[in-house]
Amino acid sequence: MSNASRVYVAGVGMITPIGADAVMTFHSVNTDISRVGATSILNRSLNPVSMALVPDGALPEFNEGLVSAHLPDRQQRLLRLASAALSQLADKLPGNPLPLYLALPEQLPDAPAPLVGNVIEQLVLQSEIELNQAESMVAPIGRAGGLHAVRKAHQYFAQPGHDYVLIGGVDTYWDPYLLAKLSAEGRLSGQGNMDGFTPGEGAAFLLLASERVKEQLPEPHIALAMPGCTEEAGHRYSDEPYRGEGMAQAVTQAFERAESVQAHCVWTSMIYDHFSHKELAVALTRNSDKLPGNVVMRHPVDCLGDVGAAIGCALVGMIAVAAPWQPNLRHHLVCCASDLAHRAALRVDIDGRIQATS
């Protein structure tokens, strides 16, 4: 893989149920700390829904300038989460406003619309951080959205003079109507259901830099190859048979677009239900020649809940900040699967000197 086909992480902003930033989130995952707990919302069996939530006190207040927009409660929380994470990058941004490629929740069948209006414009007002709104884009495609944003960043940097861009993802399941739908479908974990998942919430943003300014970044360099982005015809809400082709092809593409070296560690969005277990197993089995027998597996959802559209950037952000604590893990594979068709995989490589930390 040529260096021209890589982009680099220049900064990370993150908030999750287990961390106020990326470093805290990584260490919580690394030590199996969880914030999953019962909520005031009841499932179809009248038992409390278990979720992982960001403490409300950790979020900024909703901007008064947005009150007149009458945004849904879920969208208000999305903007507060996104603002908390994006503000962590404020002192790293160059002088000119940057475009933002933002992953957002999917519109699931028969579920309330998660978003109304111009989310980028709303986020500028909520965060008080100026963005290049004309060139910003949103991808309401769920868990795979963050890696799709990496692909868009590669395309952006192919243009001369474009050396920095923001990407991110934000999601929350804190919505009684959405939780009622998922409960009715038997998708929520809890009493009497061993084939569900734990909803969560969070936001993660990455400041990415081009090869042209790589040497201005501190070592180690966190290099992101062009991701593999595909679709799965037999997704959760499809009538097509599930064959596992989507994620398997995305992983194959991710390795083809990176150095011909095995991955030391695999990070996934797997949410621990039967479907995601099977999907990940198919993808890794079909690409087993690229994975050593002692590959490290990380599925952070068991600690922070399913953070949906935030997961791709959150995984990359944790890899970036974790380098000093795991210096022997230099080559990573990230796999993200949405509830609907979108699938994505990404190779992340740690280049340069790592100052190990005990």
Image (cartoon, grey):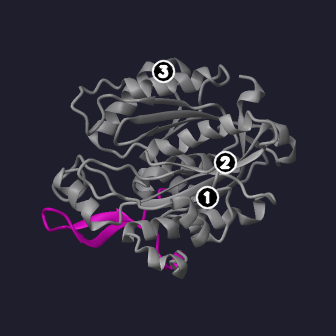
**Disc 3: which residue:** 288
Q: Is residue 153 visible?
A: yes
Disc 2 crowd rating (10 Å Cα; few below 14, some 14-19, many 20+) is many
Q: Residue at x 48, y 27 (%)?
A: 250
Instruction: Judge whether residue 258 is colored magenta.
Output: no
Task: Give the residue type that dot 2 points to.
Answer: Ala
Residue identifier under label 1: 22
Q: Secondary structure at mark 2?
A: helix
Task: Using the image as rendered, state which of residue 53 and residue 261 is in the foreground.
Answer: 53
Q: Residue at x 30, y 71 (%)?
A: 39
Which residue is found at the position 69% from the left and 46% from the top? Answer: 323
Residue 235, image x, y percentages: 30, 34
Nearer-N-terminus badge (2/1)? 1
Q: Secondary structure at mark 1?
A: helix
Residue 238: x, y in percent?
25, 34
**Mark 1 near mark 3, Cβ–Cβ under 8 Å?**
no
Label 3 amino acid? Ser
What kind of residue is marked 1? Ala
- The reply to whether the C-beta atoms of the residues labelled 2 and 3 are less than 8 Å apart is no
Q: Which mark is residue 320?
A: 2
Find out whether the residues at labels 2 and 1 contact each other: C-beta distance under 8 Å.
Answer: yes
| Mark pair 2, 3: CA separation | 25 Å
The residue range painted magenta reads: 32-58
**Does 336 sit above or below residue 65?**
above
**Is 342 left or right of 154, judged from the image as shown?**
left
Near-viewer residue (38 or 343):
343
- Which is more N-terminal, label 3 or label 2? 3
Q: Position of residue 126 (x, y in %)?
A: 57, 72
Tell me the residue at 44%/48% (across/down): 140
**Which residue in the rendered view is the most extreme toward the left?**
45
